[in-house]
Image: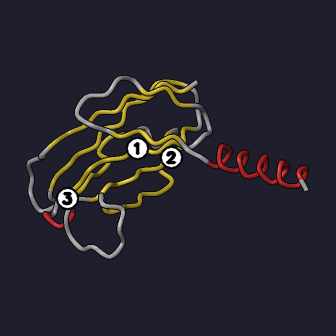
Amino acid sequence: MLKFSTLLFFFFSFSICYCQTDTIFITDNIPILKVKENLPFVLKFLACHSCGYSWSLDKVDSSCVKLINVTTKHTSGRNDIRGGNVFEFWKFKVIAVGSYVMEFVYKRPWLKQNEKVSRVELYVN
């Protein structure tokens, strides 16, 4: 019985580590991010969707940096709350070694001026 529980613990620990992707919380200024080629990573932004603000990807080399998906989650972690702040999770994969710059814009879509611009520099090895 002890061998079975040890084996079960090993597989559970391995599956958690194997499926986990790096999540980087983006604030005003961040250093160059080092990511691995062909391994997904997640950028996390704070947004206020009920105020009309959201993030958009303005500039990127889309031939090498691939957007996998964008999801949101309320900052409280609850699913039954409408309005307020949310976290936007942008999941990417880079398919070629090199240096890349991504520019994200935080604004209301109906306004021309930007509230904030975040520049993310990637170093892929």
Residue count near mark 1 (Cα–Cα under 10 Å), binned few <14, some 14–19, many ≥20: some
Name which residue lies at 19% across and 64% down.
Answer: 84
Q: Which of pointers 1 and 3 lies earlier in the amino acid sequence?
A: 1
Q: Which residue is mark 2?
A: 66
- Reading the image, the residue beneath label 1 is 43
Which residue type does callout 1 highlight?
A: Leu
Q: Horizontally, is 109 left or right of 120 in the view?
A: left
Q: CA distance from mark 3 to mark 2?
A: 25 Å
Amino acid identity at mark 3: Cys
Seen as rendered, the residue at the extreme front is 2
Say which amino acid is labelled 2. Lys
Looking at the image, residue 116 lies above or below residue 82: above
Q: Are marks 3 and 2 in contact (CB under 8 Å)?
A: no
Q: Which mark is residue 48?
A: 3
Describe the element under mark 3 as helix, strand or loop: loop
Query: Which residue sits at x=58%, y=24%?
Result: 125
Pointer 1 and pointer 2: residues touching (CB < 8 Å)? no
Q: Label 1: state its secondary structure.
A: strand
If the image is split into quadrants, where does the N terminus sit? bottom right
Residue 50 falls in image quadrant = bottom left
**Residue 37 place in picture, x, y as percent:** 60, 33
The numbered mark at residue 85 is: none
Q: Earlier in the sequence, mark 1 or mark 2?
A: 1
Q: Residue at x 41, y 60 (%)?
A: 71
Distance in Å between CA atoms under marks 1 and 2: 13 Å
Q: Residue 3, position in %: x, y?
A: 91, 50
Work out whether 100 lies above or below 78: above
